[in-house]
């Protein structure tokens, strides 16, 4: 929310790479994020933002993380 950031590490798996996080990545910045669903294979993804603003994505290796939770979509029974 207060980016841009030079580095972003996400400590929980997302189904797909959140656009909101990409928007917060500075030019020349790097994000490391596990991607994949709870029942799917997950991989640690490295995303670099190039000088032209484009993103370069590289799969590093397989991982297993808990799911990323969006607090806006939680009900009190989910906690």
Image: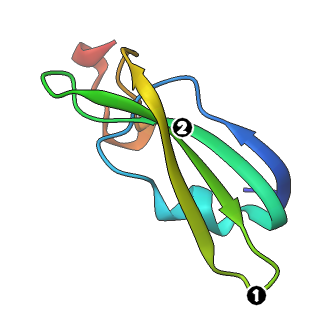
**Location of residue 74 (image quadrant):** top left
Q: Nearer the viewer, residue 26 or 79?
A: 26
Q: Earlier in the sequence, mark 1 or mark 2?
A: 2
Q: Is residue 62 above or below residue 25?
A: above
**Which residue extends farthest bottom?**
52
Which secondary structure lies at badge 2? strand
Please give the residue where the numbered disc 1 appears in the rendered image: 52
Residue 13 in percent (x, y) is at 40, 29
Specify how the rendered protein is coloured. Answer: rainbow
Q: How many marks?
A: 2
Q: Which mark is residue 33?
A: 2
Q: CA distance from mark 1 to mark 2?
A: 22 Å
Whole-percent x, y for residue 4 in the image: 83, 63
Between 74 and 47, the one lying in front of the other is 47
- Is residue 32 shown left or right of residue 42? right
Whether residue 3 is visible to the viewer of this picture, yes or no, is no
Q: Is residue 71 above or below residue 5?
A: above
């Amino acid at each position: 929310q207060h980016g841009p950031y030079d580095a972003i590490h996400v400590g929980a798996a997302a189904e797909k790479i959140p656009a909101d996080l990409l928007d917060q990545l500075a030019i020349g910045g790097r994000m490391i994020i596990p991607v994949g669903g709870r029942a799917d294979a997950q991989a640690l993804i490295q995303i670099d933002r190039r000088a032209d603003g484009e993103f370069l994505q590289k799969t590093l290796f397989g991982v297993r993380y808990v799911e990323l939770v969006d607090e806006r979509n939680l009900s009190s029974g989910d906690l």
